[in-house]
Image (cartoon, helix red, strand yellow):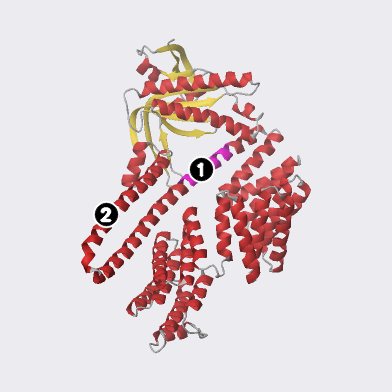
Amino acid sequence: MRIKIIILICILSEFPLKAQVNLDSLYSVWQDQTQPDSIRTNAFSDYIWDGYLFSQPDSAAILAEELVSFGKDNNYLRAQFAGYTLQGVSWVNRSDYKKTLSYYIRALEIAKEMDHPAALAIAYSNLGSVYHDKGDLTAALDNYLKSLEANPTMKMGTTFLNIGNIYKNQGNLTKALEYYRKSLELNKKEGHQHEQASSLSMIGGIYREQEDYARSLDYYSRSLKIFKQINNQNGIADTYSDIGVLYDKQGEYQEALRYHKKSLAVYEQLGNMDGVALSLNNLGAINLELGDYGKALENCQRGFDISVNIQSLVRKRASCSCLYDAHKALGNDDKALYYLELLKAVEDSLNTRETAKRLQQMEFQEEARLIQEAHEEEVRRKERTRNISFIAGIFFLLLAGSFYMRWHYVRKSKASLQIEKDRSENLLLNILPEEIARELKEKGKADAREFDMVSILFTDFKNFTEQGAKLTATELVNDINDCFEAFDAIIEKYGIEKIKTIGDAYMAAGGLPVPSSDSVKRTVLAALEMQEFISKRKAKMEALEKQAFEMRVGIHTGPVVAGIVGIKKFQYDVWGDTVNTASRMESHGEVGLVNISQTTYDLLKDDPEFNFQSRGKIVAKGKGEIEMYFVARKK
């Protein structure tokens, strides 16, 4: 960003810049009204940049507003452009992207009024960077391309690289490669070695994904050579890691180990713990391929410990997968199951984080559109004011046309905003019950509530640990997911609420957050259909000579407390003795059947749709003797 503004000031100056000694001298030039406006603008811009922008952004914004006012008072557009741009940068430094966007759009409008190619290029590039940071890749790409179109002769190597990254994120490797090559060509011509090495590395990554390993290695090697020449240690470590992955993909494990050890050494020297965790996980994965399970455990355990310390879910996921495979290969079934369950929990957290990120991106995109509309409306208002003074005779005709277009535009905008709002609400409803989500949106919080009659349903797979030891991590997770997806559909059919999954256990509740008179019956019907699904699935899997789960289900009805837990990765949960008793119903049940408590039986015993089988009193851990019944549908 700093390079862009300095280029802008030099291009827009009407006179050459004079060398400034310190902040005091810069401020003196700004105060000297005998100096040309261009010199005063340049001096004050440097004063704000060097003295306040990165240390006191609040003060920088106030000073930049003074520069804008100076430009307005003197009808000097270049000062307004510099002031709005500096204000935008001040809000970037405070991570307020909405205000950043607002000021960058004002700068763009001034650049359009100036009709200056360099100013337009910088304004569009700044807008592209904001949209890029907030994940709106379509808007980012649009503004980057407009920047190139406005002034293709500027130093745009970084912009080409940014455009390439967008196409790569979208999976368009051909387009990404095209812009990475343009970036490389420009950076070579301009002598930017760091950017040149980055472009070479990105090209190597594209060829690696396309499995053109010879070309990939050539570009990585050229990138590594430049990083070594300029002594960029992070670049060196990253490239070592990329080459290690390249050799791993080709099955050349010894070479892969050598490069990952090199990257590990540099990352450790730099104190880059994220890089250290990455290298350790890569080494552990190769150790697994070579059958060196002890070394795999050592490397991946170190990677796991570091990922916990730096709170990196991505690194933790790789470590857990490696530790599961290593412990499984060594016959440590309990530890293998522990890391498998931890892996599933990490993946759930990543999915929740991604959902939250999407919600934030949708909110930003909606707000960005509103800001854009507000500025466009301001521009239209100014244009109408100017036109009134020149074309008074056709004022009413223009006004009527403007009102019609505005009405049509607002109607279309509202429809578009409604679509985005509906999408955001659907994402929220995937996390919380509808009643709770509505309360959270209206009040900003959801109070815990007591319910007198809730049926808690628990499921659990029999011999899960033993069966899981016979499957790969991917197969095991896929099998569990297959069952839980079916359960999700069943509970939605019967209108009961999914609470959570705990490893291979599934928990749901009937009668909350909105109580109903038939919730007990619907919960039992859902449980019976779950068992029916598991039985049919087992028959299909056995016909294919594959492993299949068998399941116990238990239900108990009684009072609970329900509410949202925490403020991060929040979750709707339930508490109370009813939950514990329902868990005992499941653990003392039998495969293929639905086990219910005395309370649940008493509520359903007169229902002609069910048959009941008394089991008598059974001793349950922590509960003493409990009366239990098997329930089934009458045929």
- Tell me if I can see residue 357 in this picture: yes
- Point out residue 10 in the picture as x, y percentages from the top left corner: 50, 78
Residue depicted at 47% across the width and 34% down the height: 500
Seen in the image, is 178 located left or right of residue 603?
Answer: right
> What kind of element bears circle 1?
helix
- Point out residue 534 in the picture as x, y percentages from the top left corner: 53, 22
- The answer to which image quadrant residue 76 occupies is bottom left
Q: Which residue in the structure is indicated by mark 2?
A: 404
Disc 2 from disc 1: Cα separation: 44 Å
Seen in the image, is 138 located left or right of residue 246?
Answer: left
- Tell me if I can see residue 624 in this picture: no
- Residue 348 falls within the magenta-colored stretch: yes
Height in image: 209 above or below 121?
above
Height in image: 16 above or below 593?
below
Q: Which residue in the structure is indicated by mark 1?
A: 351
- The answer to which image quadrant residue 87 occupies is bottom left
- Point out residue 573 in the picture as x, y percentages from the top left corner: 42, 36
Other residues around mark 1 within 10 Å, as few (<14) / some (14–19) / many (≥20)? few
Point out the stretch of residues depicted in magenta: 341-355
Q: What residue type is labelled 2?
A: Tyr
